[in-house]
Image: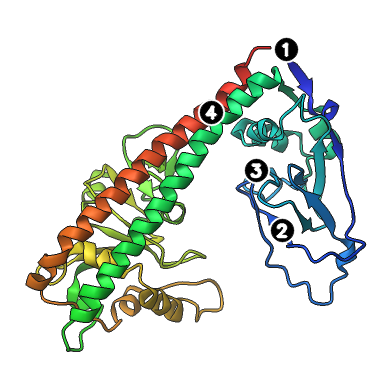
Amino acid sequence: MKSNYKKIGDYVNLVGERNTELQDLPLIGLSITKQFIPSIANTIGTDMSTYRTIYKNQFAYSAVTSRNGDKLTIALFKDLEKGLISQAYTPFEVTDKNELLPEYLMMWFSRPEFDRYARFKSHGSARELFSWEDLCETLIPIPHPDKQREIVKEYNTIVNRIALNNQLIKKLEETAQAIYKQFVVAGKADRKETLSDYIETANTGLDAIKRAPIVSEDTGIRCLRIQDVSRESNFDNWGFTKVENNNFKKFQLKKNDILIARTGATVGGNIFIRKDLKGVFNNGLIRIRADKTRVHPIILQIFFKTKVFTEHINSIAFGTSTQPNIQIGDLLSFQVSFPSIEAQAHFTEYLIKIDNLKFNLMEQNNLLENLKDLLLSKLATIEK
């Protein structure tokens, strides 16, 4: 063990100030992505004096690791001066910030290796817990504070660039929606048609268990799943799969394909394929191919992200007693009309340019995410 590895418990201590004065503070929860998020809990009639006050640069975590995506839910509170958290969370703080920077410690907690360690050390019967004692016994490298600040600065540069790119992506999406509304909605033909009139083909994908199972080895073929759509995962992060050659030919993802999640919590979420890929899709998704003599694929893709289409999806998906689900026939029955293909040509070039800019930012973010992961992985090799 390297000499700069120290027990976390030597640098942190529990805090737990109760909200006895019933301060009107924002109620905050924790997400599995290791972030604090606004709580949606119904607190009507709840004794708020039992909640804990958390202050800026303090941590909180949930000890439960079972049924938690193999992750430890833990986060650093840094966006507000103080807030309220449930008594179900364990709050703690760094005792001497001149010895250990909270941001540096949070970087360690963000490592996949830490999640695996926490899961391995968890114990219990009804549910498995990573106890406070286990957290305190965890060994991490603690270099000189100047080195910590250097590492945190480098990490934050990457994180801030990703955040900026996400803001730009959102602005580009809003611009595309504005162009769609101005030229497509305002210029649509006065005729009653359905979405099926503009679709060449629509079909679900391969069976996820038998025909397109996710495998650990590199097969050279990847499979798009619902979680990849909801997370907007880059192609390189999709799982590998084994498929027969005839299935690959039939279900290969091609340029201008649009994939829509047909079930689950993210039903209706969709992704646009911008080039031919050595990949297929499973049966949790519906592939839409536009009839290019009637509508340009980029216009159809933007339509699938409009509020009116989202409302249509919700109306047909949430009528079941089990989980949200949409059928292709219901999906394509939506009444819609687009301007003529000739009229579309006047503004599709702008939409394509916007989409190219958005795609470039998404690709840049993928590279930055890889760089961020590399930086986190190198924490374990830091010398004293």
Q: Amino acid at mark 2?
A: Ile
Q: Is residue 233 left or right of residue 321?
A: left
Q: Amino acid at mark 3?
A: Lys
User: Which three-letter amino acid code belongs to the residue tagged 1?
Assistant: Met
In front of the other: label 4 or label 1? 4
Choose the circle earlier in sequence order: 1 or 2: 1
Q: Is residue 26 above or below residue 10?
A: below
Q: Position of residue 174 (x, y in %)?
A: 36, 63
Q: Is residue 329 above or below residue 81?
A: below
Residues at badges 2 and 4 in contact (C-beta under 8 Å)?
A: no
Mark 3 near mark 1, Cβ–Cβ under 8 Å? Answer: no
Q: Nearer the viewer, mark 4 or mark 3?
A: 4
Asked whether 203 or 300 is in front, the reply is 300
Q: Which residue is mark 2?
A: 28
Q: Which numbered dot is residue 154?
A: 4
Residue denoted by label 3 = 71
Q: Where is mark 1, residue-wise?
A: 1
Q: What's the residue type where badge 4 is placed? A: Glu
Q: Using the rendered view, name the quadrant where residue 218 is placed.
A: top left
Relative vertical location of residue 280 with respect to residue 26 in this rendering, above or below:
above
- Quote the CA–CA distance across marks 3 and 1: 25 Å
Count residues near mark 1 (Cα–Cα under 10 Å), then give few for <14, some for 14-19, many for 20+: few
Residue at image point 64% right, 19% down: 147
* Point 80% across, 39% down: residue: 93
Inter-mark Cα distance, 4 to 1: 26 Å
Q: Earlier in the sequence, mark 4 or mark 3?
A: 3
Dot 4: element: helix
Q: CA distance from mark 4 to mark 3?
A: 25 Å
The quadrant holding residue 1 is top right
Mark 4 Cα shell of 10 Å, populated few (<14), some (14-19), many (≥20) = few
Residue 48, horizontal then vertical, whole percent = 86, 67
Secondary structure of the residue carrying numbered label 2:
strand
